[in-house]
């Protein structure tokens, strides 16, 4: 594990003008996309400095998405663990069921400013696809969602939700038929239709300005959490835990705590069936520096540089690369990373449902697994905040199938 940083982090200096977080990030795309990315970066810089854009974004986050979300004391889980007090940041209460709506609203407002009337997106667990379909329906935009065929099967409910809101969902049969392959197809579409199309990338990865932009749209999670925990407890949490696929919900909740060195930040990756090749999606457990889908970061790849197969019970974490900002903070020691296995996630999914009456998304449950471990190891005067990034309605059919339970 890298040593903790010895000097204060200037979070606002990242990324640099070329989109780098230290050695990570950047722009590694076909020449045909360079103009579109430069146009997007310039439009975003103008928008975030425009009070009218900021005001409109805040209004839609409140009226359409349902912000602010609550900070919830998990009393029975706290008693069960017998240690630190456990809080959930309730992103699962948002419209469409997860944090993804924050970014979808922000980007669709940018698309409208740029005159782009056709929207494309990729999705794994389906929550980003549902959020994108919802905002496109709200603003009357054409919407195409790319989704791996495997993910379409295990997230069939979300596929129907997207189509119900008018989106065209295109199944991807290439490769492993999961999130990486959906991103590939979305990028191919964008190259072909770049003049009238905006690509709403769903996580804090890809080429600049996406990692920065997606982070900024999700900063509201950490900003609210900081204010709320100070009101509830009169101090900051001792530890914050979030699941990490590409890393959007995690960087969102972590960002406003980066300069609070007493707050430990922990990202949780997908340990799958165990840390053996092709059986997990924990990029910091055997991943290597490389370039994938526009960005330099840690990637699960073989010695020849070919992308490894990945696996997770959660479609949203089943991805071979991690967002470049996460890679940077891990390398300088500011954020530490753990992983949760499928078996741990299935057990905790049921535990949280029984003890708190909250059915968490399988992605979010990875964070809860580690959060409960941390709470048990800490004294009762400590505080652990877990980002509950989404609700598990979408996962109930899949969990029932894995448990051998018939819903008929």
Image (tube, rainbow, N blue to C red):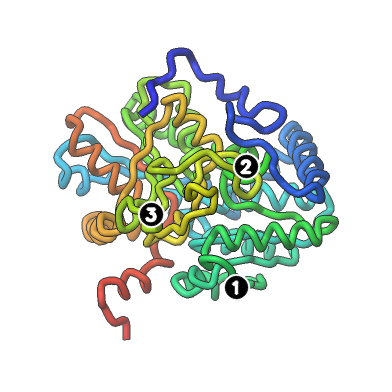
Do the residues under discs 3 and 1 have CB atoms within 8 angstroms? Answer: no
Would you say residue 246 is visible in this rendering?
A: no
Secondary structure beneath dot 2 equals strand
Q: Which x, y percent locates residue 141? A: 75, 63
Residue 348 quadrant: bottom left
In this rendering, the answer to whether 46 lies above or below 214 is above
Q: Which x, y percent locates residue 19? A: 67, 33
| Closer-to-camera residue (11/134) | 11
Residue 261 quadrant: top left
Q: Which x, y percent locates residue 125? A: 49, 62
| Closer-to-camera residue (402/100) | 402
State which mark lies toward you, 2 or 1: 2
On the picture, is 68 further left or further right than 121? left
Spatial separation of the CA atoms under disc 2 and disc 3: 23 Å
The residue where tag 1 is placed is 171
> Quadrant where the C terminus lies?
bottom left
> Quadrant where the N terminus lies?
top left
| Nearer-N-terminus badge (3/1) | 1
> Which numbered dot is residue 204?
none
Would you say residue 31 is visible in this rendering?
A: yes
Crowding near the residue tagged with mark 2, few <14, some 14–19, many ≥20 C-alpha atoms within 10 Å:
many
The residue where tag 3 is placed is 277
State which mark lies toward you, 2 or 3: 3
Image point (51%, 19%), residue name: 9
> Which numbered dot is residue 295?
2
| Nearer-N-terminus badge (2/3) | 3
């Amino acid at each position: 594990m890298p040593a903790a940083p010895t000097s204060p982090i200037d979070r606002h200096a990242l990324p640099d003008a070329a989109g780098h977080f230290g050695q990570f990030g950047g722009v590694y795309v076909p020449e045909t996309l360079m103009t579109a990315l430069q146009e997007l970066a310039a439009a975003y810089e103008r928008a975030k400095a425009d009070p009218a854009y900021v005001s409109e974004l805040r209004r839609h986050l409140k009226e359409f998405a349902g912000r602010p979300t609550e900070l919830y004391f998990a009393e029975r889980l706290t008693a069960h663990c017998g240690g630190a007090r456990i809080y959930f940041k309730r992103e699962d209460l948002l419209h469409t069921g997860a944090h993804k709506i924050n970014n979808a609203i922000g980007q669709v407002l940018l698309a409208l400013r740029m005159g782009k009337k056709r929207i494309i997106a990729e999705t794994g667990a389906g929550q980003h696809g549902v959020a994108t379909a919802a905002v496109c329906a709200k603003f009357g935009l054409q919407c195409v969602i790319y989704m791996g065929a495997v993910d379409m099967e295990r997230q069939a409910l979300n596929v129907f939700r997207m189509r119900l809101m008018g989106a065209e969902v295109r199944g991807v049969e290439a490769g492993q038929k999961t999130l990486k392959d959906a991103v590939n197809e979305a990028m191919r579409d964008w190259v072909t239709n770049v003049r009238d199309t905006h690509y709403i990338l769903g996580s804090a990865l890809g080429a600049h300005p996406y990692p920065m932009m997606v982070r900024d749209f999700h900063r509201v999670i950490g900003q609210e959490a900081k204010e709320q925990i100070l009101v509830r407890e009169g101090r900051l949490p001792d530890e914050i835990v979030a699941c990490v696929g590409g890393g959007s919900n995690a960087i969102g909740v972590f960002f406003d705590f980066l300069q609070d060195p007493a707050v430990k930040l922990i990202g949780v990756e997908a340990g799958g069936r165990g840390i053996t090749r092709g059986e997990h999606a924990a990029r910091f457990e055997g991943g290597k520096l490389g370039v994938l889908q526009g960005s330099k970061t840690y990637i699960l790849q073989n010695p020849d540089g070919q992308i490894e197969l990945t696996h997770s019970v959660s479609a949203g974490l089943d991805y071979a690369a991690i967002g470049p900002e996460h890679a940077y903070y891990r390398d300088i020691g500011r954020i530490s990373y753990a992983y949760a296995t499928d078996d741990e996630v299935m057990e905790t999914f049921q535990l949280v449902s029984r003890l708190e009456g909250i059915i968490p998304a399988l992605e979010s449950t990875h964070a809860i697994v580690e959060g409960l471990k941390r709470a048990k190891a800490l004294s009762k005067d400590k505080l652990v905040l877990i980002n509950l990034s989404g609700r598990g309605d979408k996962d109930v059919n899949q969990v029932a199938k894995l448990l051998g339970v018939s819903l008929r």
